[in-house]
Amino acid sequence: REGACTQQRCRQGQGKEGFSQPVCKTHKTHSFLRREPAMIAKAASALYGEHSRLFACLTQQEKDNLEVADFGLGDIYHTGLEVITYVNTDRCCAKELVLLPGQTCPEHIHPPLSEANPGKEETFRCRYGRVFLYVAGESTPHPACQPPEGVYTAFHQIILEPGGQYTMRPNTLHWFQADACGAVVSEFSTHSDDGSDIFTDTRIRRAPVVRD
């Protein structure tokens, strides 16, 4: 089924970019191998470059600083995100979010930071692929995706295809997943403070843990 979650299909050794892509519980890693961030970054760069045709426009520093996040769960091909940050000032932020096939950014909110700061407001605009965005609200019957292992409570589905966009107010509970081809999403927001994000799954750590 096109666009369906790919988490139950183990494709060990059959990654689209020619490297091992463990996507089942049997083959998952429990924390980053030292070599794994580079492998993921290579895949994200290839996806971004091939389909958005903009990777060549990035500075070398932006390419080198591509963020690979596994959220501390050690199952990055299910739960993870690759991020290119263009700018993040006190007032605004612009990023590219790159999702590998079937990859999910886990459920979280951007909470109020102070009386004067209600938290992060963000707009997602799909540039490539298809993104299944889930926010708090009335649950969608028969959603297109199932979340990976973890804690998920928001199931109001919004489907973003290239050119589609959606704006989330601060403190909006949300998570999102790419279709079987992967996805590239532009994010435009107020200031981004990843360390303040609150995840529904309390096991999640925003900073990756790397092991040899």
Image (cartoon, rainbow, N blue to C red):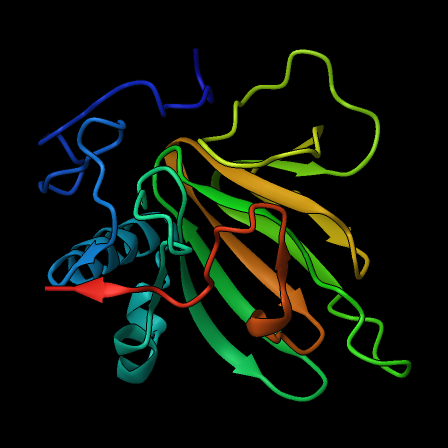
Which residue of the protein is positioned furthest toward the bottom in this rendering?
A: 90
Image position of 52 (left or right of 49) = right
Image position of 1 (left or right of 120) = left
Residue at 67% x, 45% y is 174
Along the viewing direction, whichever of 108 and 180 lies nearer the viewer:
108
User: Which picture quadrant has residue 59?
Assistant: bottom left
Image position of 8 (left or right of 143) = left
Quarter of the C terminus within the rendering: bottom left
Residue at 73% x, 68% y is 120
Along the viewing direction, whichever of 112 and 126 lies nearer the viewer:
112
Which residue of the protein is positioned furthest toward the right in this rendering?
A: 115
Where is 183 relative to 114, above or below? Answer: above
Query: Residue 84: where, in percent of width, then height?
Result: 42, 68
Residue at 18% x, 25% y is 11
Residue at 52% x, 23% y is 146
Q: How many marks?
A: 0
Along the viewing direction, whichever of 54 and 4 lies nearer the viewer:
4
Where is 154 relative to 32, above or below? Answer: above
Quarter of the N terminus within the rendering: top left
Query: Residue 132: where, in percent of width, then height?
Result: 58, 33
Query: Residue 166: where, in percent of width, then height?
Result: 72, 48
User: Which picture quadrant has residue 131?
Assistant: top right
